[in-house]
Structures are given as C-alpha cells and as structure tokens.
Amino acid sequence: MPSSRFILIINDNIAQANILKDALSAIGYNIIGIAASVDEADQYKHHLQLNLVISELFFQEKEDGLRLVENMRDVPLPVILLADTANNEVFGRVASVQPSAFLVRPYNLFSLRSAIEFSRITLESTEYNNPVFVKSNNLLIQVKPEDIMFVHAEGNYCHMVMRHRKLLLKMSMNQVQAMLNPEDFIQVHRNYIVRLTEIESISLTNNELMINGEIIPISKMKFRDDLLRRVKMVK
C-alpha cells in the first residue's frame, strides 16, 4: 500500500515541490521532507524511515540529479529523476547512472505512482529477499531476513533477535534498518525495530507491544501513530 512509502522530494523550485508533495500525500504517500539541493538532501540520507527519493535532474542548469544517484548508492535508496525537458544526449547521461525511473514532464500522477511502486518491487526483489551475512564475534553468519523478529539497539551494538537465536552485531540501527524490508519491519522506538507479523499484542495503555513473550516499548511521541496506521484493527 502507498502508506508504507516514505519519500524525500528534492527540488530547488519550492512551489513545484509543494505541488508534488500535496499530490502524493493525497494518494497516501508519506513525505518526510523537501530539500532544495543535493547537498541539503544529505541530512535525510540515513533517515530511519526514508525508502524512496524523487529528485529533479536539473538544479540551476546543473545535472545535480546525476550526482544524487551516485551519492545514494551506499544506502541504497531508489531514486526517481524528473525533468522538464530531455533529448537523446540527456537520456544517455541519465541511463549511465541507472536511476530507478526517469520521467519527463508533462507526466500524469498515475505514471509517477507506477514508477514509485515498480521501484519498490525492483528494490525488494533484489535487496531484501536474499540471505545476508552479518559479522558477530569474528564470524560471518548467514541471516535470512524472514527469520528476524526484532532488533534492539544498545550503544554501538544491535541485538538481532530471531526465534531460535540472538546475535550481537557491531552495527548501528541505521545500518541494520537499511537491510530490512520496510514493508515487513517498522521502528517503534529509537532503540527497537520489529517485524509486523511477529507482534502478538499491543498495549495502548502502557505503550508497549509483545513479541515471543518479550515486552517492547513503543515511543508514543514519534512512532506509535505510524504503528497503528500499519496494523489492521477490527473494532
């Protein structure tokens, strides 16, 4: 569903950016911010919820959108590039950096939404569904993402809790979250990421949830509303 997409818009034309923001918000997407330049976008690069970027190709006559795609390779995040005009030379340069999609105005909202959703499908099929190796106590251990129940950050380390074992990783919360599918996992506290399907119960009174018998706090101020939007409730 669109509501699980958290998008950063990068455009030095603020009026144009706000029009795009309003249009995407109206069909259910979450806009985490608007950056006026590629450099300004760096502050959002490791945002815990960000999972897609929509950027202009041209900034004050410069093809900064190409630099943006290169900058995002280490995260990684899908990048959709937009432009008011293009020719064969421009298409060639855009193709060389391989963005998730490239749209030239005028485009309709359906085309943009299709690009967003196909970017999600492509990224998840290549990035999230394969086993990964994590380093724990000088061992590289294979972890299947579907085995992870929740992750608990503690200082410079993360505890990755699975049904049959727990791993201590020298990784930041950002690094761990980058390898998890945002469709399956959600951050509920600054120190906790959980798999949605593993949640056994949610206490609205105590702002906590339970997974496999373990109580996990929910941050009421920052993450609770997002969690409640993501779970299906029958009243």
Image: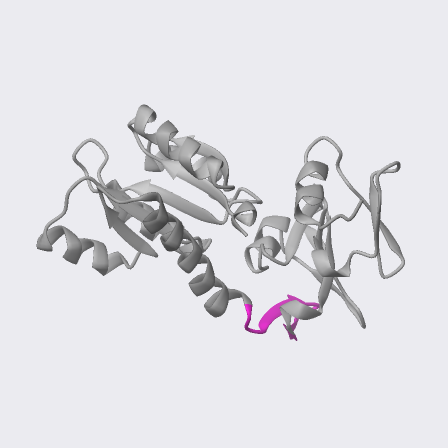
Which residue is painted at 58% across and 44% down in the image? 48
**Could you say which is closer to the camera, residue 3 or residue 168?**
3
Q: Is residue 38 above or below residue 212?
A: above
Q: Position of residue 30 (x, y in %)?
A: 52, 39
| 121 relative to 57 in the view: left or right | right
Which residue is painted at 26% across and 45% down in the image? 107
Q: Is residue 147 above or below residue 176?
A: below
The residue at the far top in this view is: 15
Which residue is painted at 71% across and 68% down in the image? 137
Q: Is residue 189 visible?
A: no
Q: Position of residue 7 (x, y in %)?
A: 46, 42
Q: Position of residue 144 (x, y in %)?
A: 64, 72
The residue stretch that appears in magenta:
129-142
The quadrant holding residue 58 is top left
Question: Image quadrant for the C terminus?
Answer: top right
Say whether residue 140 is magenta.
yes
Q: Is residue 6 above or below residue 88?
A: above
